Every structure is written in structure tokens, then in C-alpha cells.
Image (tube, grey):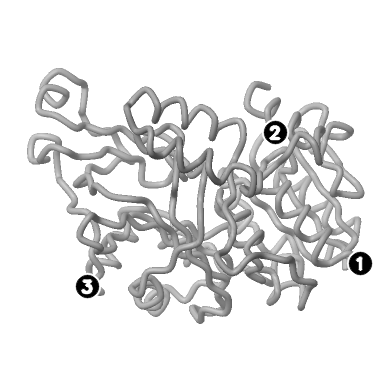
Amino acid sequence: MRILIGEISSYKAIVIARYIRSAYPEADLWAYDNKAMTGWLHTRYIKHCVRLPFQSLDAYMEALAAYVRDNDIDVLLPVHSDYIGAILQHKDLFGHALDWVGQYSDYIRLHEKDQLMAIAASLGVRVPKNYASITEAKVPFVVKPTNLSSAKGVRYCLSEIEKTSGNWSLVNGEICQEYIAGHGCGYEVYCRNGKILTEYGHIRLAEWPISGGSSVLRGRYIHPDMRPVAKKILSAVPWTGFTMFEFKLTPSGELVLIEVNPRIWGSINQPLQDNCPLFEHILGKGERLEVSGDGVRTCLVPQVWLAMLGYLFRGQGSRVRDWLRHWGSTRRDVSFWSDPLGLISMVIRKIV
């Protein structure tokens, strides 16, 4: 089986390549990227890597589709959130390589936060309250784009002083929501036509930026309401593919749905390292990794180091102590010692 992963300088692609190399040693693993130097500066876990220069989105889709066709790719695994929508819009160009993923129409209903919130609310799922305007919004609140992933473009207003002194006007493509205090957690699945086939749950132990960013330290966690909420959403949107339901766990123990990522998510190394067979229904049964009964922790470096400095300066020393206590057994998403070129390519990606 010939598998193509990209963009390979993304840490998500690197951890997937490492997992497939371990769990499916007979797989023929290829990669692509649009960044300079990736033809030779890339993770050691892939066999071939091609650079497809980005000139325009349509040209990039055509070049990628041509590469898939010309090289008899069996499974295409795109990971970069900026391109997933365009790839699904052009899904017919990729033939059977994208049989494992659903249609653009379902993707957009989960991806667009305003559409998702309306669907969830109609199903009785607890979601943050939406405000029609900044004037109506009660502090604390958050302003976020409707169609960007992770913490991109998210702004937080935590006090009346910030509200009156800052520029909080809403622009086209933004929504204003109630800020939900609590711990971030996620419920990750691979589903087919809305049916959950593989599942996993995690909790965020650190994020960067610490004000509300991406997960950089995680552990295993399941809340009894995760699966019922996911099943409700998937009954309305019968998605096929990977999906991560992002929640806030409030101090009272209630789950509040924040967003749904219908694609490969940033913390995918956590379920993979904890022996969750997420790719089983795409690639078949693979070899299993050894894990302890309590599960594993995973982290993203160097971002986790920045997060711990931030928590330390905020006086949250307990987070830092907990991180140090488990540091020796925490599995890095990408390690310099085992995959130096992979880590270097990941860092350069941010600055090139």
C-alpha cells in the first residue's frame, strides 16, 4: 500500500508517519510539502518526499492531484487545516485515494463555527452563548473567526476595562461568544457515515499561548458525556473521516462544546501513542504499541517549554511541578534525538 502524507514539515504529519512506520512496517510511505528544503530536510520516517511549490490554491490542488495519479497513491493523508477544505472541494480529482473521507458539504457544517453552534443548540447540546454584538456581550467573552482552526485569530476580553478600552468591533467572518472557564478536553473519533468506529479522549494539561492556545501537553481522559454529544452531532451531520470534538470541562464537571475539527487534529500523537487504532478502518489492523495501564502523556516541544515559563510567571507552579514529575515518561511529538531533521524542518516551517 502506497501512502502519501503532507505537508510533511507539519508535526502532525511527522507523528503520523512515525506511527505508520511502526504499526504498518510494510507500508510504502511517501510525503509532500510546499516549503523550501523539504525535499531533503524532512523526517526520517518517510521514503520519498516531493516539494510542490505553492503558486495558487487551484494550481496546488492540481499539482497534488497529478502527483497522486502519476504515482499510484492508494491513500492520501493531508494534515494541514488550511488546505483540507479545498482538497474536499476537488475530491473527485484524487480518485480512490480519498475514499476514507466524506464530502465537503458535511465538512463545512462541522468546520464553520456558526453553523456548528446552530446545529448543536438545536440538538440540546450545551454550547457557549452567542452575542449579536460587542455591546450586547457580557464580560468575559471571546471573539473568534468562524472558519479558522485552533487558536488562530481568537481574542479574549476578560474585564470591563478591556472591553471599553480595546477595539472589539466584529468584522465579517467573526463571532462573539460567552467565555467558558475550565479545562480544555477533546473526544477524537474516526467515523463512517456518522457512525463512530474508533474513539479516544484526552485532557489538556498545558497550552500555548497559555491564555487559550493549542494543546502542548496532554493525557488520557474520558468524560461520560463525550460520546453522547458526539453521537448527537453526527446524527445530524453524517461525516466520514477523522473528527475531534473540543470541549471545556467546567469547574462543576459539565462539558460545553466549543468546536468540532473534522480533520486530523494537532494532538493526534496522544491517541496514537496510547495505542488507539485510529487508522485501522483505513489501513487495516496494524501492530500495537506498548503502553502502561494509566496511559501515556504526550507533549509538543519547544512550545511546552514556553508554556511552562508562562505558567511559572503566572504563579501556577503546580502545573510546572506536575510537568517535571512526569517529564521522563512523557512522549514528545517530535524528538530531536530520534528525528533531528524532522524537528528542524518543523521549526523552520514556522519562520520560512
Q: Position of residue 266 (x, y in %)?
A: 56, 48
Kind of residue indicated by mark 2: Met
10 Å crowding of disc 2: few (<14), some (14-19), many (20+): many
Residue where numbered disc 1 is placed? 26
**Res 228 label:** none
Residue where numbered disc 3 is placed? 124
| Quadrant assignment, res 36 | top right
Residue where numbered disc 2 is placed? 346
333 to the left or right of 341: left
Query: In the rendered image, which quarter contains the N terminus?
Result: bottom right
Q: Residue at x 44, y 47 (%)?
A: 205
| Quadrant assignment, res 319 | top left
275 to the left or right of 123: right
Which numbered mark, 3 or 2, is in the foreground of this view? 2
Q: Relative to the observer, which residue lies in front, 121 or 92?
A: 121
Q: Quick one: SS at disc 1?
A: loop
Kind of residue indicated by mark 1: Glu
Q: How far separated are the C-alphas under marks 1 and 2?
A: 26 Å
Label located before the other in sequence (1 or 3): 1
| Quadrant assignment, res 273 | bottom right
Q: Relative to the observer, which residue lies in front, 269 or 132?
A: 269
Kind of residue indicated by mark 3: Gly
Q: Residue at x 58, y 75 (%)?
A: 198
Q: Relative to the observer, which residue lies in front, 179 or 202?
A: 202
Q: Quick one: SS at disc 3?
A: loop
